[in-house]
Amino acid sequence: MAIRVTIDGRPVDATLNDSPAAHDFADLLPLTLDLEDFHQTERIAYLPRRLTTSGAPDPAVPRAGDLAYYAPWGNLALFYRDGDSASADLLVLGHVDVDADRLGTADRITIEAAS
C-alpha cells in the first residue's frame, strides 16, 4: 500500500507491506515524529501505541530504506544502513525510497495515507 512520507520537509516515495502490523500502523496515520539516531544504523521514534505482532512474517535482515517496528520498545525504525541480522522482534513494515545519506540525517518524518 502506498503512503506519503515527508522527511525534513521533502516528500519521498514509500510503501507499506501487507502484514497485520503494517495495517495496524496505517491506522495510526497521519503521524509526525521526531527522529533520533540509534547505533549509527537507524533513526527511531516512539509510536503513540504498540502495534499488533500477530501474523508477523518470518524475520528478515533490515536493509537501508526499510521502515520497521521494534516490538519490545514500541518504536518505529527507519534504517539508513543495512542491519546486522534478522530478529523476530523487528517487523519490517515497508520501504522508503530515498538515499541513505538523507535518511541518516533525518530529524522529522511525517507519514500519511496516500489519497
Image: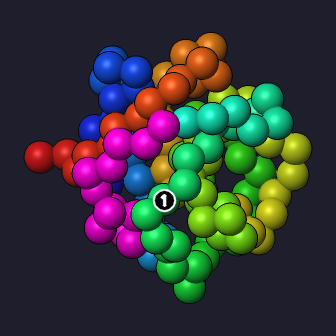
Which span of residues is magenta-colored? 23-34
Residue 54 place in picture, x, y as percent: 56, 85
Kindly identify the residue that appears in the image at 32 percent across and 63 percent down.
Answer: 28
Q: In the rendered image, which quarter is residue 102 located in?
A: top right
In the image as oriented, which residue stretches furthest toward the left? 115
Mark 1 is surrounded, within 10 Å at the Cα level, by few (under 14), some (14 to 19) or many (20 or more) other residues, namely some
Q: Nearer the viewer, residue 58 or 70?
A: 70
Q: Determine if residue 74 is in view.
A: yes
Q: Determine if residue 91 is in view.
A: no
The chosen color scheme is rainbow
Q: Is residue 69 magenta?
A: no
In the image as oriented, which residue stretches furthest toward the bottom? 54
Q: In the rendered image, which quarter is residue 71 located in?
A: bottom right
Q: Is residue 37 left or right of residue 26?
A: right
Kindly identify the residue that appears in the image at 28 percent across and 38 percent down.
Answer: 4
Q: Nearer the viewer, residue 64 or 9?
A: 9
Residue 16 place in picture, x, y as percent: 41, 53
- Disc 1 marks a residue whose amino acid type is Leu
Residue 85 place in picture, x, y as percent: 87, 51
- Label 1: which residue? 47
In the image as oriented, which residue stretches furthest toward the right? 84
Compared to 6, does 76 lie above or below?
below
Kindly identify the residue that appears in the image at 87 percent across and 44 percent down.
Answer: 84
